[in-house]
Image: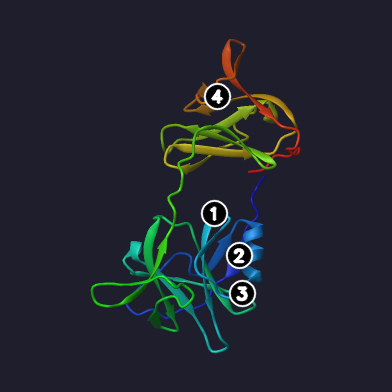
Amino acid sequence: MEKSKFILAGVCLLCFGLSLSSQDLGFIVEDKDLHLYLLDLKEARPPHTKKNRLVFTFQGSTRTRSVGIAFSFERFRTVHLMARNPSRIFFYVLDPPEDRFTYRLVVDGVWMADPSNPVVVEDEDGVRLSLVSLPPRPAEEAGPVPLEGEIAFLFRYTPGRRVFLVGEFCNWDPFLLPMEEVEPGLYRKTLSLPAGTYAYYFLADGKRIADPENPRRVYLDAIPVSLVEVPPRISARLQD
């Protein structure tokens, strides 16, 4: 099932001696709920997580033409444009590459700390920087993980490979359900399925591999496959 993409238009920003990121022509938000949340923001907030993304906001005025954001992990060399919603809230959505970093806003060409973020530090030159410090993210374990309304299949394998989830739920089609590499060497596919027991395996490098983290197995045509139990509350549909 192909993901719907919601494009939120960006705004122009004049940058002197700085590069603009590839996202500066607009923002692509693949999650509908996140898209609606950003459009409905009525006031700026400190950096906060939404749908596993970090959201930065700035309260604009009728005179505010453009707002950008620059990060320490890019050495402040790139200014990313912030989009604006109907309430004049400028926002930027980030998948943070680090758990702790600083950033600055660029409002109509003027660099400043984020007025909505009370956590501020100073560099060696006395420049005020806004600080983000996230709690460490727990490492995901492999194996099937029941979630509310769905189930996630996780598989650890060599990074950078094409891996597919194959099972009774897709009539054993070997290429219908490609898995996403969510971090180096960790592949994931989330499904919503009718209640029941399903046999499945992973297909990687042309090899059929039973789930090494799932002890429940049977043999089909002398080939080991894994079994997963789906509780009744999970609805009957597939999703990417």
Residue 85 numbered tag: 3
Residue 31 rendering spot, x and y as whole percentages? 62, 56
Mark linked to residue 52: 1
| Disc 2: which residue | 7
| Label 2 crowd (10 A; few <14 / some 14-19 / many >=20) | few
How far from the left and from the top, in percent, is residue 13? 45, 79
SS for dot 2: strand
> What is the number of the mark on residue 214?
4
Q: Left or right: where does residue 76 sit relative to residue 156?
A: left
At which x and y percent is residue 3? 64, 51
**Residue 1 on image: x %, y %:** 67, 44
Q: Observer-nearest residue: 102 or 1?
A: 102
204 and 36: which is toward the camera: 36
Which disc, if any, is residue 19?
none
* Marked residue nearer the N-terminal end (4 or 3): 3
When the figure is inspected, residue 180 is found, relative to residue 216, above or below; the finding is below
User: Of helix, strand and loop, which one carries label 3?
Assistant: loop
Residue at the outermost top position: 222
SS type, badge 1: loop
Q: Determine the residue located farthest toward the left in the rendered image.
A: 124
- Tag nearer the camera, 1 or 3: 1
Q: Answer with mark 1 or mark 3, whichever residue precedes in sequence.
A: 1
